[in-house]
Amino acid sequence: MKLFARLSPDGGELPQPADERRLCLGFEAWYEALDAADDPAAATARAWSGSPLGKTLLAAIFGNSPFLSAVAIKEWQFLTRLIEHGADPLFAEIATGVEDRADRNEYTSSLMQRLRIAKRRIALVAAVAELAGVWSLEQQMEGLSRFAEAVIGAASRHLLRQAAGKNLIALADPADPEQGSGLIVLGMGKLGGVELNYSSDIDLIMFFDPAKSRVITR
């Protein structure tokens, strides 16, 4: 279990649960999710979460953060992969997937669903990596900022392709719609400084240079 490698045997570095009621509810929901799962990975999840370190880690989540508790239970398969393989490869997998410039020819609703799933998994990676002492504060901020930029890029490419599909603009490079599009998205504040944290919002300024991209008029 790679994620546990940096922790002491008793998990003394992890936060203590602050809310006993939420702690109990979290464990109940966790085991209900595993019991209901028709997935061989449930046995692995049950094994690590039943170990002393696993219980201590889940207690730190369930007893302190309702949001992370809900994500951990919903994403128990992903959390199990995180425990097994560590934070870096899973973060890279999600981030590079969102950064992929290939045209998936997906509906806006499909893109939104894909990005929502990626967002909650990134939140889980960043939080658990910090709890386990695997990521420093700087790594966490860099990771959250990179993911935010990736999401902005994915949304921008989708909207540009959508506009081109409706014959509103002519893309200079349909395979890479951002290039030569005339669309400029500036990240302000903490995103611009690569300092995003969990409570940060994203402030954007957007410009469009019509000289760079041909707008189709009717």
Image (spheres, helix red, strand yellow):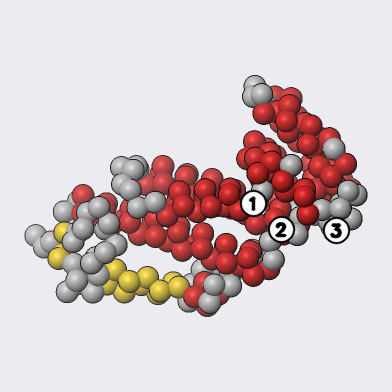
Please, what is the three-letter code of the amino acid marked with disc 1?
Ala
Residue beneath the point at 20% across and 51% down: 166
Residue at image location 21% in from the left, 58% down from the top: 173
Q: Earlier in the sequence, mark 1 or mark 3?
A: 3
Picture coordinates of residue 156, whole percent (x, y): 35, 59
Q: Residue 54 occupies which quadrant of the picture?
A: top right
The secondary structure type at the circle numbered 1 is helix
Q: CA distance from mark 1 to mark 3?
A: 18 Å
Q: Are marks 2 and 1 in contact (CB under 8 Å)?
A: yes
Q: Label 1, on which residue?
A: 87
Amino acid identity at mark 3: Glu
Q: Is residue 191 visible?
A: yes
* In the depicted structure, whether residue 185 falls above or below residue 22: below
Q: Secondary structure at mark 3?
A: loop
Report the number of discs. Answer: 3
Quick check: marks 1 and 3 in contact, CB under 8 Å?
no
* Vertical placement of residue 170 versus 75, above or below: below
Say which residue label 2 marks: 134
For this rendering, which residue is in front, 113 or 197? Answer: 197
Assign the N terminus to one quadrant of the image: top right
In the rendering, which numbered label is found on residue 13?
3
How many C-alpha atoms fall within 10 Å of the one at disc 2: few (<14), some, or many (≥20)?
many
Q: How far across and how far down the image is residue 154, in percent?
A: 39, 55
Left or right: residue 141 versus residue 108 is: right
Mark 1 Cα shell of 10 Å, populated few (<14), some (14-19), many (≥20): many
What's the CA distance linking mark 2 and mark 1? 8 Å
